[in-house]
Amino acid sequence: MATVYKNADSIVAHLDGVVDAVHEAATSMARRGQRILAAHTNTGAAKVTVTRGRTDSFVNLEDPGGAAHVIEYGRPAGVSASGRRYGAREPLHILARAVGEA
């Protein structure tokens, strides 16, 4: 019977080439996400970026206007705290589509 050590995932994650391969995969996903985002006309200054940590890389949807969550997940129509009405927005699922989950 095989033995699986508790820290096997950490050992594999730190093997030569694995960190770079993970970053390459994240960069590829970010490129797909940026192409998906570019196909939409009302996304403002939003962009898809990659953040690289010591081991992992992260694909991010960033929007300086603070609407990244609305772009990804949508929102219902409503009224803001200041009384301003805003319309519903369909979710675009930029990141989910970039990684093939939507």
Image (cartoon, rainbow, N blue to C red):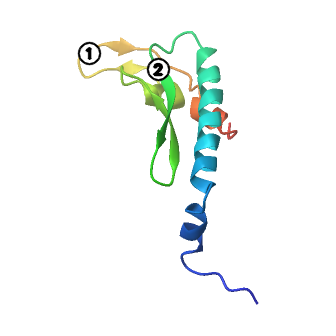
Write the residue at 65% across / 39% down: 99
State the residue position of label 1: 83
Q: Residue furthest top?
A: 41
Of the pair 19 and 65, the residue shown nearer to us: 19
Q: Residue furthest front?
A: 16
**Residue 57 at x, y percent in the picture:** 52, 46
- Compared across the picture, whether 34 is left or right of 77 comes to right
Q: Is residue 71 above or below residue 45?
A: below
Q: Is residue 79 above or below residue 102?
A: above
Q: CA distance from mark 2 to mark 1?
A: 26 Å
Residue 14: tell me if it is visible.
Answer: yes
- What is the quadrant of residue 100 in the picture? top right
Categorize mark 1 by other alpha carbons within 10 Å: few (<14), some (14-19), many (20+).
few
Q: Is residue 55 above or below residue 38?
A: below
Of the pair 100 and 84, the residue shown nearer to us: 100
Which numbered circle lies on residue 46? 2
Q: Residue furthest bottom?
A: 1
User: Which amino acid type is shown beneath numbered disc 2?
Assistant: Ala
Write the residue at 57% across / 53% down: 19
User: Which amino acid type is shown beneath numbered disc 1?
Assistant: Gly
Quadrant location of the N terminus? bottom right
Q: Is residue 10 above or below residue 16?
A: below
